[in-house]
């Protein structure tokens, strides 16, 4: 797909940005593009959220996976990490 075709699916059909905005600021996201670096993935997305917002994160993931753009995903690796809480005292 050309960049314009990709943008059309991303913005006009999937409404990726508009649908994701409602999860801010509870869920922070950072996107790293690597397609032009010869990496095996087009991009890496890093999410951060407090444990209290875990259900919202799962909803966001379901929303994104239900979009038209997701039809073009050939491979996904979903890695989840949790920061260990240290007790004071």
Image (cartoon, grey):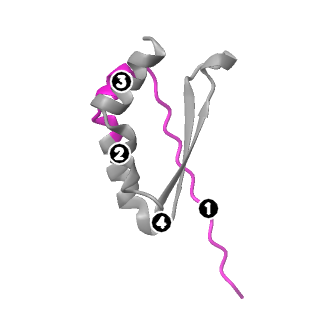
In the foreground, 82 or 7: 7
Cα separation between marks 4 and 3: 34 Å
Marks 4 and 2: in contact by CB < 8 Å? no
Cα separation between marks 2 and 4: 24 Å
Marks 2 and 3: in contact by CB < 8 Å? no
Q: Which image quarter holds the N terminus?
A: top left
Tag in front: 1 or 3: 3
Element carrying mark 2: helix
State the image coordinates of residue 13 (x, y, percent, origin top left): 28, 29
Cα separation between marks 1 and 4: 10 Å
* Residue underneath mark 1: 83
Queried whether the magenta region covers residue 75, the answer comes back as yes
Queried whether the magenta region covers residue 86, the answer comes back as yes
Q: Residue at x 56, y 29 (%)?
A: 43
Q: Residue at x 53, y 42 (%)?
A: 79
Point out the residue furthest to the bottom here: 89
Residue 66 placement: quadrant: top left
Range drawn in magenta: 64-89
Tag in front: 2 or 1: 2
Element carrying mark 4: helix
Tag in front: 2 or 4: 2
Q: Is residue 5 left or right of residue 89?
A: left
Cα separation between marks 1 and 3: 37 Å
Is 1 located above or below residue 49 in the figure? above
* Residue underneath mark 3: 8
Marks 1 and 2: in contact by CB < 8 Å? no
* Residue underneath mark 4: 51
State the image coordinates of residue 68 (x, y, percent, origin top left): 29, 27
Q: Which of the numbered marks, if any, corresponds to residue 18?
A: 2
Is 25 located above or below residue 88 in the figure? above
Count neighbours of disc 4 (C-alpha within 10 A) and say few if under 14, some if 14 to 19, many if 20 or more.
few
């Amino acid at each position: 797909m050309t960049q314009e075709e990709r943008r059309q699916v991303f913005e006009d059909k999937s409404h990726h940005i508009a649908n994701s905005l409602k999860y801010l600021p509870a869920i922070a996201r950072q996107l790293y593009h690597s397609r032009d670096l010869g990496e095996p993935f087009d991009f890496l997305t890093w999410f951060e959220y407090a444990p209290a917002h875990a259900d919202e994160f799962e909803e966001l993931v379901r929303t994104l996976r239900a979009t038209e753009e997701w039809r073009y995903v050939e491979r996904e690796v979903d890695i989840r990490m949790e920061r260990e809480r240290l007790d004071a005292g």
